[in-house]
Image (cartoon, rainbow, N blue to C red):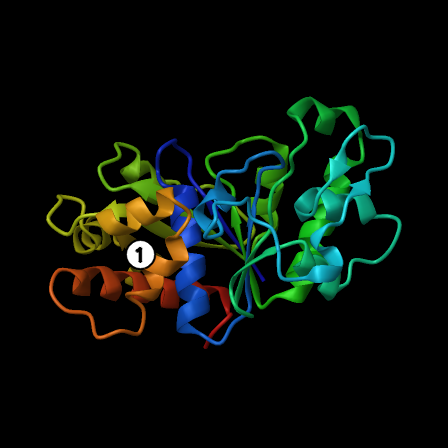
Amino acid sequence: MKIAFWSEERKAGTTFNTAVVACASALMYPLCVAVVSGSYQNRDLERHFLTEKGRSVLAEDCESWKEISLAAEQQEYFAFGGLDALLSRIGKEKLTEEMIKANMRQIIKDRLYCLPGSARMEQEWWREAQSFERLVQVINDVEDCFDVVFIDCGNKKDDFPQKMLREADICVLNMRQESELIGAYYRNPPRLRGKTFFLMGSYFKENLYTRENLERIYRIDKDMLGAVPYHPQLQAASQIGRTEGEIEEHVGKSIKGKNIFFEQELSRTVRLILKRSGVIA
């Protein structure tokens, strides 16, 4: 099951929303979740999930793969785990679940994994015609190992992210609450193969464009619209790679005061996205 996050505009918080919803999904439900970037060279997503010592995102708990260094065929670089290591093995052997998870960072034990992006320069991708074919195969193999894969496509409009959007079972369209494009999103949403869900990030319930107002103005089904409320502590935690730690403080806890609204909206949003995709009943 693929769930792709994308926005037609910049600064809609798409990567942040992907990380937050993926973390909450793994904490709220008995699921094994993967989170990957829909861009072949973007490392922004994994920065939400650094280790305590600030190392890059990589599965340090799998000793057999910890120090692996694979020379990619016809390339002058070495793949130290992550996407590059998996790409170098496509066409040589079948990617097993053990191999895939060994090259991912385990964020929440047995529940949430992140696939580190490629370290190659952008021109290296376009120099080899089969790069993107192998990348598609890696994503498909990752999907086979998890209950659900969240794909961060940012606001990219190039071929590979758009392919991920077309192939996704559900596309989460991210928007800023105050965006002038908000009406256009509802009137003429992009035509995609999968189901659509609308998500507002950095959400304030006091603003003009509340969920209730949008449902009324555009007559949108309330089950197709969610929000991730603005949360300064979570924003700060994400900047130092501790997104999952902050989310864990809210999900399933007896929250009081101003954080009740955040927990209620996030829990509702996660439930609706997973339900619309068919991951939960």
Disc 1: which residue: 226
125 sits to left or right of 39? right
Which residue is drawn at the image coordinates 33% and 41% (left, top)? Answer: 175
Answer above or below: position of 255 versus 138.
below
Q: Quadrant of residue 131?
A: top right
**Where the N terminus falls, by quadrant?**
bottom right
Quarter of the image holding residue 77? Answer: top right
The type of residue carrying mark 1 is Gly
Is 95 situated above or below 240? Answer: below
* Residue beneath the point at 26% across and 32% down: 180
**Helix, strand or loop for disc 1:** strand
Position in image of residue 170 (x %, y %): 50, 56
Q: Which of 214 and 42 is in front in this view?
A: 42
Position of residue 272 in the picture relative to residue 105 (left or right): left
Near-viewer residue (211 or 49): 49
**Which residue reaches farthest front?**
53
Q: Residue at (41%, 69%) from the top-left corner?
A: 27
Residue in the picture at 65% in, 34% down: 119
**Is any atom of residue 275 visible in this view?**
no
Q: Residue 210 location in percent, x, y?
A: 18, 50
- Location of residue 95 in the rendering, given as x and y in whole percent from the top left corner: 78, 58
Is residue 84 visible to us here? yes
Q: Which of 31 and 57 is in front in this view?
A: 57
Which image quadrant: the C terminus?
Answer: bottom left
Direction from residue 143 to residue 254 in the image, left or right: left
Q: Eyeballing the image, is 279 above or below 22? A: below
